[in-house]
Image: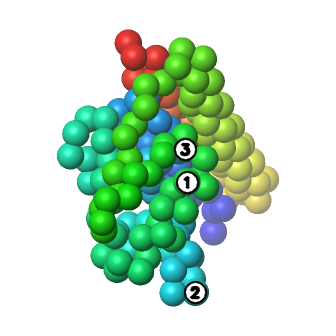
């Protein structure tokens, strides 16, 4: 049975794209987004849990996030987790509600974030190229084992290259739009 699997290669390439989109969503752009708090883990009930499992996160205004903690006893834990997350936001506790005003980004910070966005994109491109290499290796091995013909190898190789090019175009587009958003253009 041939080792080459088009669906597996497609799934892995799009997996790299999804990881990039998730990473980019976590970058702060000066605009409130619930994705900003996604990576934060809160230590409650003797376990680490994502913040959205102990509170409701919402965006009442473009530059404000609110965290409605469900259990009054967890407010301190949630506040501490946000403070220690290193996202540059100071939580303000107001009863069971924690307000998170989003400060303006400095020009220097915007440039750092744009650079980070392009590093994320480069990581995704490398991942996609590694998937392409694996696919090409599988095709070479299938041809050596006489499971596919030389013509079939060339045709499938072109297909893999097209999938790679298309995915990298999507990666570039996602990174470019995020960089423009960060730089406020």
Residue 97 showing in the rendered view: yes
- Residue 67: give x, y in percent of width and height: 33, 59
Element on which disc 2 rests: loop
- Residue 76: give x, y in percent of width and height: 48, 69
Earlier-in-chain disc, 3 versus 2: 2
- Residue that sits furthest to the bottom in the current view: 45
Labels 2 and 1 touching (C-beta < 8 A): no
- Residue 3: give x, y in percent of width and height: 66, 62
Q: Is residue 170 left or right of residue 110?
A: left
If the image is split into quadrants, where does the C terminus sit? top left
The residue to which callout 3 is attached is 87
Q: Residues within 10 Å of mark 3 (few under 14, many from 20)?
A: some
Q: Residue at x 31, y 59 (%)?
A: 94
Q: Residue at x 44, y 42 (%)?
A: 25
The residue to which callout 1 is attached is 83
Q: Residues within 10 Å of mark 1 (few under 14, many from 20)?
A: some
Q: Residue at x 43, y 25 (%)?
A: 104
Q: Is residue 18 left or right of residue 148?
A: left
Query: Looking at the image, which is closer to me, 38 or 140?
Result: 38
- Residue 39: give x, y in percent of width and height: 52, 57
State the CA–CA distance, disc 3 to disc 2.
24 Å
State the CA–CA distance, disc 2 to disc 1.
19 Å
Q: Residue at x 54, y 15 (%)?
A: 107
Element on which disc 3 rests: loop
Labels 3 and 1 touching (C-beta < 8 A): no
Q: Residues within 10 Å of mark 2 (few under 14, many from 20)?
A: few
Q: In terms of image quadrants, where is residue 53?
A: bottom left
The residue to which callout 2 is attached is 46
Q: Is residue 183 above or below residue 77?
A: above
Earlier-in-chain disc, 2 versus 1: 2
If the image is split into quadrants, where does the N terminus sit? bottom right
Is label 3 or label 1 in front? 1
């Amino acid at each position: 049975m041939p080792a080459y699997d088009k669906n597996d290669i497609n799934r892995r390439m799009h997996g790299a794209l999804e990881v990039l989109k998730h990473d980019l969503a976590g970058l702060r752009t000066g605009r409130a987004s619930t994705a900003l708090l996604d990576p934060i883990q809160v230590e409650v009930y003797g376990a680490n849990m994502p913040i959205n499992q102990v509170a409701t996160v919402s965006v009442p205004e473009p530059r404000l996030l609110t965290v409605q903690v469900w259990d009054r006893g967890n407010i301190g834990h949630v506040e501490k987790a946000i403070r220690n997350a290193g996202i540059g936001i100071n939580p303000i506790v107001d009863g069971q509600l924690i307000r998170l005003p989003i400060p303006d980004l400095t020009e220097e910070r915007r440039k750092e974030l744009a650079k980070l966005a392009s590093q994320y994109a480069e990581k995704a491109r490398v991942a996609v190229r590694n998937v392409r290499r694996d696919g090409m290796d599988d095709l070479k091995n299938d041809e050596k084992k006489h499971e596919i013909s030389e013509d079939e190898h060339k045709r499938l190789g072109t297909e893999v290259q097209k999938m790679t090019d298309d995915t990298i175009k999507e990666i570039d587009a996602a990174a470019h739009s995020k960089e423009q958003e960060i730089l406020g253009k």
